[in-house]
Amino acid sequence: SAQTPTRSKNAEDIIKGNAIVVFSKSWCPYCVLAKEIFSKRNLKHLAVELDLVENGADLQASLYATTGQKTVPNIFINQKHVGGYDELSQIAESGTLEDLCQGRSMEFEFDLIVIGGGSGGLAAAKEAATLGKKVALCDFVVPTPWGTKWGLGGTCVNVGCIPKKLMHRAASIRQDLNDADDFGWQGKSSESVHAWETLVGRIQGHVKSLNFGYRISLSETGVRYFNSFATFVDKHTIKLVKGAEELQATARNFIVAVGCRPKYPSVEGARELCITSDDLFSMRTPPGRTLVIGGSYVALECAGFLVGLGFDVVVMVRSVLLRGFDRQMVDRIETHMTAYGVKFVKNCTISSIKKSEKLNGIMVEGENKGKKVFSQAFDTVLLAIGRVPNTEKLNLEPIGVRLNDETKKITVSPDDRTSVSNIFAIGDVADGVPELTPVAIQAGKFLVRRLYNFKTELVNYDFIPTTVFTPSEYACVGYSEDDAIRELGEGNVEVYHQEFKCLESVLNSSSKFHPKNYAKYITRKFDGKEVVIGAHIIAPNAGEIIQGFALAIKLGATKSDFDSLIGIHPTVAEVFTTLEISKSSGKSAAAAGC
Ligand code: FAD
Ligand code: NDP
């Protein structure tokens, strides 16, 4: 309930006589917003409209003299100068405005505490500290059942993207070694033997250097680092535990960026006998005969590089490969991987895992609709059946943070806010968000800029490119052909495609390492144009190629834009500038020449 006096006392008396005062100007949009913040919360405030009261100019001059602030709104709560609209909205965002107005102490140790030192958490903490905020970050890795643990940096750095891509690279070197003879290299390059221990040692060395770099960059930006496990006590307090050490810390705002960990099936022995991607990249001994269970990113990428490194690999899949991806591309990936040496067992779920002294390994049985269909011994069983969010031990629900009942991820609004207004969630732990490193990083940066740097931009989750690092990489952005037809109707969709062989492999005789490549884009026929709404490619370095085209597609490029783009010859990427064969024409898109 705002009041506007026609005559006013001096500024000091007004401030002393009223709990909440907004010195305002009736035409100022920020003043309107500031007053709305109080009104919406039923907080009784006095609005002094400096352009309407007789002594407005004098009041403004005296406010400038005492606060150094020339602008309006100029806000006071319980005789304390708060600042302008931005300061007020930050307090309101953090959920502490009511407490402040009621005179409760609002002194926190930190402006922001980030829980989780992975891709999203590190980006957010560093950004906030750079903006002058007092920030703490806590990160703690609970060891796997095999005792594997790691340093600061989260999944991507320690047990995800980085070691995975290095193993993918190690496997692709085998392809180069195999090709070398055909390019005139002499010697026994194709008979080279791989030393797993050397690769793991080098990868772990690199990972440790990244862990160290993150610690340094936190300290350089002034972020206080706690290598402790965090649990909420209330909406402004967390408990930090490391071994016998326990302490508490308070903050105005929290960002939860605790990520996910691999899921275990409810089969006896799974935790004791199986490993996950959390263990694989630091295994000191070679994995040997490996069963990979799962059919998505992690399963296919690991199966691919393990075969490339020379191991026997079986992949047990309960349903389809790469659910949610373009089916035609997935079928090609399956064909390529099978030719490469991966054995797929489809429609099969694990029913028993036992150590077998006789077979010197782990005996695994699988079933389909209750019928035993699989039985084989392995040296290593790698579970890749998805990931569960690290929300169980955070004490979120008791303090009011809502979780999705099914996924147990944190429910967030488009501005990353949870159901408790000063607690935010980003990255893999946020419900409905793609589990990808660049997504977590951008969410962290944008959130902090909205909180502390007056920006308003939200993360746009459309047209996020991705790559599955299978032996022949599959990269895509936007719609799959199946989704486009389902959503827009077959008559509104056209697909242009081409199978091709890349020049790098034309001298090579082994098709095992050089399958046919394939590219397509999907267009939406609209207003006499064909807007490209999805692009897919299976080719060497497909990820590098799709990254650039993703921008064009995000900006609304049409088929004629792609056609008018002059390619770089001879490259793989140029295929997107020359796609002529439409699926509706029925013409063959089989590979023909360079
Ligand atoms: P995380 O990086 O998982 O970080 C969360 C951190 O919080 C962890 O260090 C965790 O230990 C810590 N933590 C948890 N609970 C607490 C607590 N209570 N207190 C303190 N600390 C806590 N993405 C890509 O974009 N490209 C890829 O090629 C790619 N490859 C991948 C390969 C594998 C094998 C896996 C598993 C994932 C891969 N990803 C990839 C996904 C990517 O790693 C994740 O999307 C990204 O790491 C998510 O970042 P985050 O900040 O949300 O969480
Ligand atoms: P996903 O959630 O993507 O897939 C889980 C897979 O396991 C599916 O094939 C699923 O089959 C199967 N599955 C689930 N439960 C069971 C079960 N009980 N028994 C047998 N199979 C089961 O998990 P991932 O771990 O592969 O990847 C997690 C996320 O990490 C990805 O979604 C991706 O965002 C990210 N990531 C990104 C990478 C990249 O960018 N290159 C690489 C690796 C990970 P079904 O389809 O039947 O449900």
Image: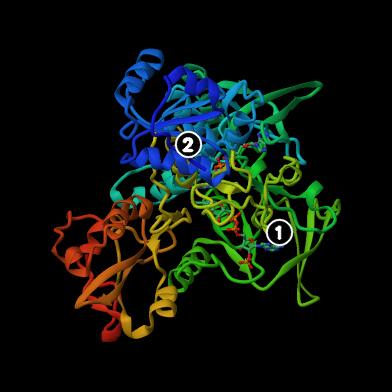
Vertical position of residue 77 compared to residue 426: above or below: above
Residue type at mark 1 is: Asp
Q: Give the label, 1 or 2, closer to the camera.
A: 2
Alpha carbon distance from label 1 to label 2: 31 Å
Q: Residues within 10 Å of mark 2 (few under 14, many from 20)?
A: some
Residue ID for mark 2: 89
Q: Relative to the observer, which residue lies in front, 439 or 359?
A: 439
Q: Position of residue 460 (x, y in %)?
A: 40, 53
Residue occupying the point 63% across, 44% down: 420
Q: Relative to the observer, which residue lies in front, 380 or 127?
A: 127
Q: Position of residue 544 (x, y in %)?
A: 34, 50
User: In terms of secondary structure, where does tag 2 sit?
Assistant: helix
Q: Relative to the observer, which residue lies in front, 195 or 186?
A: 195
> Residue 57 is drawn in which quadrant?
top left
Residue ID for mark 1: 405
User: In terms of secondary structure, where does tag 1 sit?
Assistant: loop
CB of mark 1 within 8 Å of CB of mark 2?
no
